[in-house]
Image (cartoon, rainbow, N blue to C red):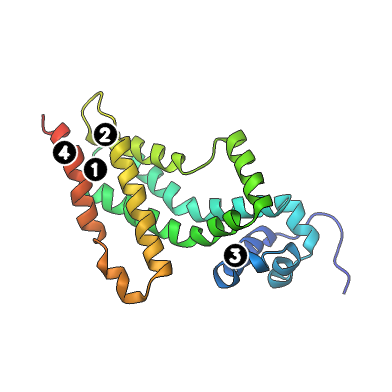
Amino acid sequence: MTRPRGRPRTGVREAVIACAQQTLTESGVARLSTKEIAKRAGVAESSIFYHFGDRMGLLQAVIQHQLRPFKDLLTDRSDTAATDLHADLVALLSTLEDFFTAAIPVMAAVESDADLRAVYRERSRDLDLGPHKAVEAIAAQLIRHTAPGTDPRPAALLLVGAAHQRALQHRLSPPDAHSNLPAPAAIADAVARILEPHTSK
């Protein structure tokens, strides 16, 4: 069967992103070829280049797709005038942990391929992308819980680090080992104690 020429059919982008995520989770970067992804998604390989440009563009699209719930949470919270600090922290931590759990295979793919790593660093520099953006975004949310002039970035960094550590434990350790780490509520309590003295003055 000959594929029609011209603009790829709708739904291709979403199908390719889903298949790329599935391939990375199941097989790692070794199977992350445009030919393999196109086969899994049931699309022409040229469609991948049309939508994403190259493998790095595809990986960036996967990351952006995984970030959507986190961005949605930030948008929802920014629309709320008054929020509970502990509830904010638990929601941010849980959403970030879900993101890292899904994103770790993508990060591993970039880190294990010298060419991808070089391209990622170049694009991250040009587009101002990277882990610091998560810290900045969370700090912007926590600023409402701090006194004027207080820097919320240390608390934000602790929250990001805790989410990443819990995600690593989830992906790399036996299922029963995940319970050895503090629960989101306990982590939220610890981070809140960093911020609350400033809000009570």
The mark that comes first in sequence, 4 or 2, is 2
Q: Few, some or many C-alpha atoms within 10 Å of disc 3 (few <14, some 14-19, many ≥20)? A: some
In which quarter of the view is residue 78 placed?
top left
Visible residue check, residue 173: yes
Residue 127 is situated, as x and y percent measured from the top left of the image, at: 59, 36
The mark that comes first in sequence, 1 or 2, is 1
For disc 3, the marked residue is 18
Which of these two is toward me, 52 or 8? Answer: 52
Labelled disc at residue 144 = 2
For disc 1, the marked residue is 83
In which quarter of the view is residue 201 placed?
top left
The mark that comes first in sequence, 4 or 1, is 1
SS assignment at label 2: helix
Labelled disc at residue 127 = none
Comparing labels 3 and 1, the label whose residue is closer to the camera: 3
How far apart marks 4 and 1 lie (CA) works out to: 14 Å
How far apart marks 3 and 1 lie (CA) works out to: 34 Å
Q: Few, some or many C-alpha atoms within 10 Å of disc 4 (few <14, some 14-19, many ≥20)? A: some
Q: Is residue 164 left or right of residue 112?
A: left
Comparing labels 4 and 1, the label whose residue is closer to the camera: 4
Q: Is residue 167 above or below residue 114?
A: below
Q: Are marks 1 and 2 in contact (CB under 8 Å)?
A: yes
For disc 4, the marked residue is 196
